[in-house]
Image (tube, grey):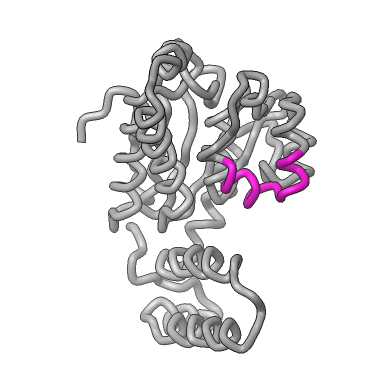
Amino acid sequence: MTLQTVLVDIDKRGVATVSLNRPDVRNALNPLLISDLTTTIQALGKSNDVRAIVLKGEGKVFCAGADLGYMKDIATFSYEDNVQDALALGSLFEAVYTCPKPTISIVQGGAYGGGVGLVATTDICIATSDSKFCLSEVRLGIVPGVISPYIVKAIGQRNARRFTLTAELIDTQLALDCGLIHQIADSLETALSLCLDNILKGSPVAQTAVKELLRTVESQPINSDLKTFTAKAIATARATPDGQEGLKAFLEKRQPNWITNHE
């Protein structure tokens, strides 16, 4: 896989670090970066050698949103060109949101526009105290179209209304309070290490299953059909090799040896 705008490193534990590598333009999104990220996330999500994916930005800023040159090009697009362009960006957010592996974004400096979309699609986000976030689309006369479903899922309808209508800067405390991020860290490296340690203690099979489970139940009414669905979900999990090993290890007071553990 040849990538021009993304760096990928997979360590011996199976942790894949995916770095947006356009620091000279604050990792702003353009068609090539969008394509590289989409391809990378999709490939890592299918890899048996990967346990978790860390998304980060090279340089001082996580992601500044759309690249200026890209925005100039968009201004000349036809309606159909705009639809196809937006669909490509939507495929990136969908790839991250539906990725079967645990995903963690670590933010330094800030995330703006589509960068906030990337944050919202990951399972966990850790940010430095000086980071800023902004959904500035209305000040450009546009809307946060393809990221809107993920923003609403991450911070709720009321918060999404506030931050998209005002386009105000969101500091890390406000981002934490509304659920956009999960932790403010003095040291991203230390906080990430602890988070990964906790993730790697879990069953990879169960983690993939729980992500799919949560996506499914989120939009379902609580009724007898959902009760049956969730009962079948745990019954299926208990019957897997990891499910059997996890319960056995708990009863024997030892650490489980997951079938897909990395040496």
Dividing the image into 4 quarters, which one contains the N terminus?
top left
Q: Left of 39 or right of it: where is 234?
A: right
By secondary structure, the bulk of the magenta-drawn segment is best described as helix
Q: Which residue is drawn at 77% across and 37% down?
A: 162
Quadrant in the picture for residue 176 = top right
Number of marks present in the image shown: 0
Image quadrant containing the C terminus:
bottom left
For image coordinates 42% across by 80% down, the residue present is: 245
* Residue 66 % position (x, y): 49, 22
Quadrant housing residue 125: top right
Instruction: Check the image and name the residue furthest to the left.
Output: 1
Q: Is residue 169 magenta?
A: no
Query: Residue shown at 40%/34% (left/top)?
Result: 83
Rendered location of residue 40, percent (x, y): 32, 40
Name which residue lies at 66% across and 25% down.
138
Q: In this view, does 165 lie above or below 229?
A: above
Residue 187 rendering spot, x and y as whole percentages:
64, 32
Q: Which span of residues is magenta-colored? A: 148-161
In reply to whether residue 150 is colored magenta, the answer given is yes
Q: Toward the viewer: 215 or 102?
A: 215
Q: Which of 186 and 91 is in front in this view?
A: 91
Q: In this view, does 263 lie to the left or right of 63?
A: left
Residue in front for this viewpoint, 156 or 143 = 143
- For residue 223, above or below residue 204: below
Residue 90, located in which quarter of the rendered image? Answer: top left
Where residue 190 sits: x, y (%)?
60, 38
